[in-house]
Image: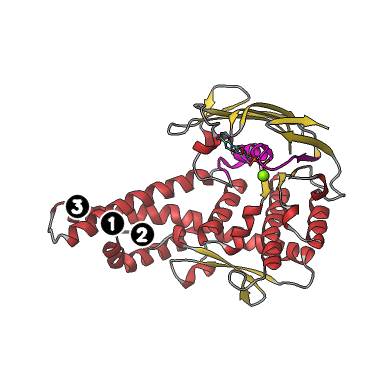
Amino acid sequence: MHVTHLSLADFRSYTRAEVALDPGVTAFVGPNGQGKTNLVEAVCYLATLGSHRVSSDAPLVRMGAERAVVRAAVVQGDRQQLVELELNPGKANRARINRSSQVRPRDVLGILRSVLFAPEDLALVKGDPGERRRFLDELITARAPRMAGVRSDYDRVLKQRNTLLKTAALARRHGSRGGGGDAALSTLDVWDQHLARAGAELLAQRLDLISVLQPLADKAYEQLAPGGGPVLLEYRGSAGEGMADAGGREELYELLMAALTEARKQEIERGVTLVGPHRDDLVLKLGRLPAKGYASHGESWSYALALRLASYDLLRTEAGEPVLVLDDVFAELDERRRERLAELVAPGEQVLVTAAVEDDVPQVLTGTRYAVSEGEVRRV
Ligand SMILES: Nc1ncnc2c1ncn2[C@@H]1O[C@H](COP(=O)(O)OP(=O)(O)O)[C@@H](O)[C@H]1O
Ligand SMILES: [Mg+2]
């Protein structure tokens, strides 16, 4: 798929922007702080309903404006669709497809798919488990858009359950019998089931994703850094050892329920949910060692790139070519990794690259050039 037109209104630094795009490579070049990342961030927002730079929508709306609108015309095969999102921080966002009446924002998922490479990706390897969970869950949603609903169900249930646990913990500390504490405890069983239900579905998807991603990541790592692997993706679940071998959703549900029962006492003491996909990690191993804490800077970069390349490979085979976005990554890489990465992405149906200077764009990525300066996007 590829985007043929991108429109922004009050998104980030842009009051307005209209950018026509071609298939193949397009590079946005300009000094730092001029709005290059803002452009590609808008494309990725339409694909994921999130930004790789911020966790809330507020910074995405131009300072002083009330709402932002991002719109893209997307072509897949012989089908063209227009997706539009209106960002209303503090209120519900709105979405439209083909200018028709409103749909839920999550209904636009799947129309545009993207794989983003960004300097922030190093945190996939070096950062907290939350970074890797987000990586898995975003990819799960790109493979199966209905998982957006499961993820939001899970988050909602988790929040409710944590509130209950806090109430119970508080009541216990104040030594009160009956009242809030007991009521909270008696409803906890029901919330356990809700949590395990949504949690099992999320886990099943994560485990399936890891099993298909594993060989692709290993292959990509070998292409980027021959002989440097092997790469091994290991899921570390809070519900215990049996998880990787669990047959399916029902079994995972049972495992979660058992782990919740076991953790109940401790959970009430601490007032938080200690078991579930929100506590899990994906351990990235290079050879026999975890990459985090052991891999060199260059190896960590190769690992992060390999995960993104594997994502690209997977989406391409399962759902058709996603749009590739490389935000300021080439400047971060040494010559060898830079060239390898460029060769691997160059054949993509659409590749959007940003760079501070033309020299940072590898030679094989010839294509359309835009100069970005002071919020103006000009074809050169
Ligand atoms: N919500 C916003 N309102 C106005 N300006 C913003 C907003 N968010 C970011 N900016 C501005 O956008 C610029 C950064 O744009 P960016 O696309 O990240 O630059 P680069 O070209 O280096 O990738 C900064 O100058 C920042 O102040
Ligand atoms: Mg940038």
Q: CA distance from mark 3 to mark 2?
A: 18 Å
Q: Say whether marks 2 and 1 touch (CB < 8 Å).
A: yes
- Pick whichever of labels 1 and 3 is earlier in the sequence: 1
Left or right for 280, reference 193: right
Q: Is residue 300 left or right of residue 199?
A: right
Whole-percent x and y of residue 269? 26, 65
Q: Residue 145 lies in magenta, yes or no? A: no
Q: Tell me if 324 is positioned left or right of 177 in this view.
A: right
Q: Is residue 31 magenta?
A: yes
Q: Residue at x 52, y 58 (%)?
A: 204
User: Residue type at mark 2?
Assistant: Thr
- Counting from the top left corner in percent of width and height, residue 99 is at 61, 22
Which residue is label 2 attached to?
273
Which numbered circle lies on residue 183? 3
Where is residue 324? Give x, y as percent: 72, 45
| Image: magenta residue range | 25-51
Of the two numbered discs 1 and 3 in the rendering, the one whose residue sits closer to the viewer:
1
| Three-letter residue code for mark 3 | Ala
Residue lying furthest bottom? 288
Residue that mark 1 sits on: 165
Residue drawn at (77%, 67%), measured in percent from left and top?
225
Instruction: Classify the position of the N terminus by image quarter.
Output: top right
Distance from disc 2 to disc 1, alpha carbons, whole Å, reads 8 Å
